[in-house]
Image: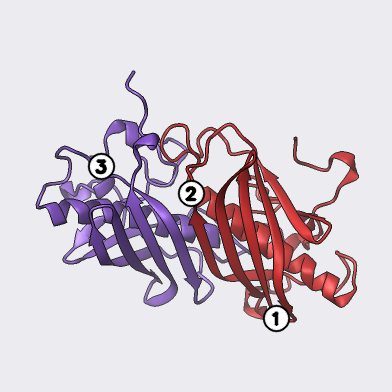
Chain colours: A red, B purple
Amino acid sequence: MKRGDMDGIRFFQDFYPDALAQCYGCGRLNEHGLHVRSRWEGNESVCIFEPRPYHTAVPGFVYGGLIASLVDCHSTGTASAAAFRAEGRELGTDPPRRFVTASLHVDYLKPTPMGVPLLLRSTVEEVRPRKVVVVTTVLAGTVEVARGRVVAVLMPDSFLPAAP
Amino acid sequence: MKRGDMDGIRFFQDFYPDALAQCYGCGRLNEHGLHVRSRWEGNESVCIFEPRPYHTAVPGFVYGGLIASLVDCHSTGTASAAAFRAEGRELGTDPPRRFVTASLHVDYLKPTPMGVPLLLRSTVEEVRPRKVVVVTTVLAGTVEVARGRVVAVLMPDSFLPAAP
């Protein structure tokens, strides 16, 4: 499945303010980046990503650091969306709720084959105003290849770019 | 400090067999990759990495997924070197000892500023024939910005490319 805004879908990351959309993992404005995109599917959030041929570990298998990066950005995106949900607000309304990673844990269960789109499927374990915990399973086809757990915290003001 | 083989230093990853040197994070033969390089400094292993301008999280700060990738590859490299040490063998002798990541944990302590080379400094917490645990601190200048812990396991035969 091609990622993008097919079917008019808008992803969590499409609502990040421009100044916060530069991330290598998920920023729509980072031309070198991975462009991780996440959306709700009921109470779960999902992300599909097709590793590029050079995202290899040993030939034929996907690089674990890429999987960690996908878990990271998909989880902070999910944290943001969960915060909006908890506040009963639509994505993109003010004020923004952008989260950063306090801790990232990934268990690699099986070698991840190249050439298969990866599906990340996450549940929100905890939502507080300044802290969200997201648990993720990573699937290659029907095979669970990794599990992730991210503790995301509301972005500190020191991260925000100074006004121009 | 420029990375590479200045001063004739050879890094752990320089000794990986060609077939196992394709990794996006640390493979010397991956032209798109990060080229993580690690070496001993006494009983610690160290790695210096300069994030590229596009390895950003929000402007001015380094992408956490990059830090996770550095911790990952530096730790599996350290695991390999620790296995050779434990066997009393020189790097590059047969058989190779290449490790993969079973679990990766990173705690992000502070925002990591761009424009400063990152130093990873690791200790080997446990060495067994098929399992090595590596604990890492990540420094930006003198500031500890992250801590990592990797459980690395000896690469399963299923990862090895079939003979041509």
**Residue matched to label 1:** A130
User: To which residue does mark 3 refer?
Assistant: B14
Determine whether B146 is above or below A19 in the image: below
Q: Position of residue B19 (x, y in %)?
A: 33, 31
User: Which kind of residue does numbered mark 2 sit on?
Assistant: Gly
Question: Which label number is shown at residue B158?
Answer: none
Secondary structure category for the residue under label 2: helix
Q: Tell me which residue sits at (59%, 39%) in the image.
A: A51
Answer yes or no: are tags 3 and 1 on the same subunit: no
* Residue annotated with mark 2: A64
Residue furthest to the top: B164
Q: Nearer the viewer, residue B34 or B97?
A: B97
Residue at position x 30%, y 32% in the image: B18
Where is residue B90 shown, x and y percent of the image?
A: 12, 47
Front-most of B147 and B34? B147
Disc 2 to disc 1, how far (Cα)? 29 Å
Q: CA distance from mark 3 to mark 1?
A: 44 Å
Furthest toward the left, the residue is B88
